[in-house]
Amino acid sequence: MKSLKYVSILIPLSAFVLCATPACSSDTPSTARVSLASYLGAGTQAGVNDSSQCPLSAQSPWVLIGDPTNTTSVSDGDTDSATGNTVSVNCKVYPETDGFHVEANAKLGVQGAVTISGHFTANTGDPSAPALVNIGGDFSRADTGSFTQSTCTATYTTNPQYMGVAAGRIWADFDCPTATYTSQGKTCEGKATFKFEICSETP
């Protein structure tokens, strides 16, 4: 699959670091938000995820919610303006050993959903840093099926100056080159850039 091209713009760090001051504290639970650009289709690994193994064309849009390249996000329960579908967001990002454990799911009505889970360490600021490994991914859609992989990778390459993970939030790129629909014997490559915010900070 050709590399996804995103427009990378610089935004104030405060746009990602939400409610870092005591004045933001409240007894009222906040609503999780998401922006997600996800794609699933044939990759470039011959006999593994290419057109002989994947029924979808390269870079087929999967679930699109908001725009993670310009911080346009949508709250849980809101209506997506592009499709009219209701957005559902469930996410947890909490401290775990040397990083954070992430469990995040975004669903766009009956159209489909993307789920990410695993251990994420902080962005070092080095765009050449090794990718994070063994991240779980699930790309599910009613008309196509569910493609899963437990060994996906994640990076902070789209906007390395501002992407990262912290308690309650994560912004990253995601690659699942062998996402498999097991019952159908189909394997495609799934990719995404996602931002989850105002997530639960506890297990």
Image (cartoon, helix red, strand yellow):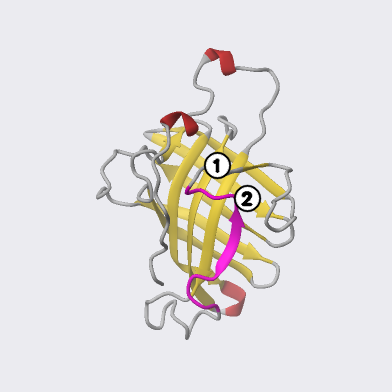
The x and y percentages for residue 12 are: 42, 32
Q: Which residue is mark 2?
A: 106
Q: Residue at x 54, y 50 (%)?
A: 67
Element type at marker 2? Answer: strand
Element type at marker 1? Answer: strand
Q: Nearer the viewer, residue 201 or 126?
A: 126
Q: CA distance from mark 1 to mark 2?
A: 9 Å
Q: Nearer the viewer, residue 81 or 63?
A: 81
Q: Is residue 150 left or right of residue 8?
A: right
Badge 2 crowding class, 10 Å Cα cut-off, few under 14, some 14 to 19, many 20 or more, is many
Q: Is residue 46 magenta?
A: no
Badge 1 crowding class, 10 Å Cα cut-off, few under 14, some 14 to 19, many 20 or more, is many
- Residue type pointed to by label 1: Phe
Q: Quadrant of the N terminus?
A: bottom left
Q: Quadrant of residue 30?
A: top right
Q: Nearer the viewer, residue 1 or 101?
A: 1
Q: Which mark is residue 196?
A: 1
- Residue type pointed to by label 2: Ala
Q: How many numbered callouts?
A: 2
Q: Residue at x 41, y 61 (%)?
A: 5
The earlier-in-sequence mark between 1 and 2 is 2
Q: Is residue 167 above or below residue 2?
A: above
Q: Quadrant of residue 85?
A: bottom right
The x and y percentages for residue 33 are: 61, 40
Q: Specify start and end residues of the magenta stretch as a single range.
A: 56-69
Q: Is residue 97 left or right of residue 203?
A: left
Specify the farthest residue to the top: 22
Q: Residue at x 53, y 51 (%)?
A: 116
Q: Is residue 69 above or below residue 170?
A: below
Q: Is residue 46 above or below residue 68?
A: below
The x and y percentages for residue 60 are: 54, 71
